[in-house]
Image (cartoon, helix red, strand yellow):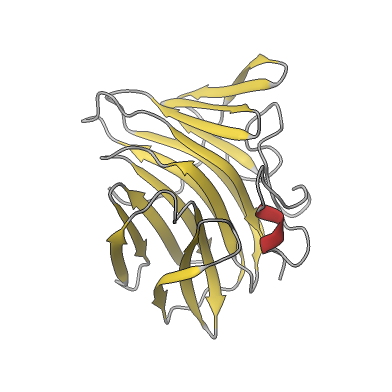
Amino acid sequence: MRPVIALLACVACGRVGFAAYGGDDGGVGGDDGGGSGSGSGSDLGTSCASPGYGDTFEEVLPCTNFGMPVATNGGLATSNGTLTITPNANANTMLGCERANSAFGDAGAFVEVSQAIPAPGQTILLVQIGVKSASIIVTPPFITYLDPNANSVMTAYDATAMRWWRLRPVNGGLNAETAPDGKTWTRFASSGMGITGTGTVAIFVQTDSSENAPGTAKIEGIDVCPP
């Protein structure tokens, strides 16, 4: 299964303090005209020099502080600062948040993931600038860096030590990094492929029709730091 970006629309439902998206249609992300301050329920904001396009998932309608929701064959819900992603069973799913026209600067893009989707699904942080894209993909028990230049690095995934994931431009290339706290970053992969400029950033989950009990993923925050 490869990471892709879908153009989807959603239908909202829920109650005050809790919201959900679900269904088979979707929409594409917002741009720099929107967005909110940086941060997450723990310490997301400390990873930016100044507020970026962050979403701490305190909003009623999932993903709207960051960009737009993506909801194909499953549901998104926000409650108490957590985005819960629930794929439908036995379906090809694409669920999460994406932001188009996002400036991708030196501090990169990062997410706090308290629970990746169980295998064989994938939880994906993706950055796409023009025709170039790079992803951190977690398919427990592995975490993988992947880009279209055939650069692929896979290592063991530790959900506690690797609670935070980041893609960051460095010296004309790109680093894939993890941290337990959003502060102490460790590189697990690097590529000579540079990505800087304005493009799409997304966090999403994919599962396929062979999975009859996909479980859920939980995201505590996402941010793109300003250049």
- Residue furthest left in the image: 210
Q: Where is residue 29 in the image (x, y as percent from the top left)?
A: 62, 45
| Quarter holding residue 136 | bottom left
Q: Which of 59 and 103 is in front in this view?
A: 59
- Residue furthest top in the image: 15
| Quarter holding residue 11 | top right
Q: Where is residue 98 in the image (x, y as percent from the top left)?
A: 57, 46
Whether residue 151 is situated above or below residue 211 in the rendered picture:
below
Q: Nearer the viewer, residue 9 or 76?
A: 76
- Residue furthest bottom in the image: 171
Residue occupying image coordinates x 51% and y 23%: 22
Whether residue 163 is situated above or below residue 28 in the rendered picture:
below
Q: Nearer the viewer, residue 58 or 35?
A: 58
Q: Where is residue 43 in the image (x, y as percent from the top left)?
A: 67, 52
Residue occupying image coordinates x 29% and y 71%: 150
Q: Where is residue 46 in the image (x, y as percent from the top left)?
A: 70, 60
Is residue 46 found left or right of 29 in the rendered image?
Answer: right
Residue occupying image coordinates x 64% and y 54%: 223
Total marks shown come to 0
Q: Nearer the viewer, residue 38 or 192?
A: 38
Is residue 87 found left or right of 20 in the rendered image?
Answer: left
Indicate the quadrant containing the C terminus: top left, top right, bottom left or bottom right: bottom right
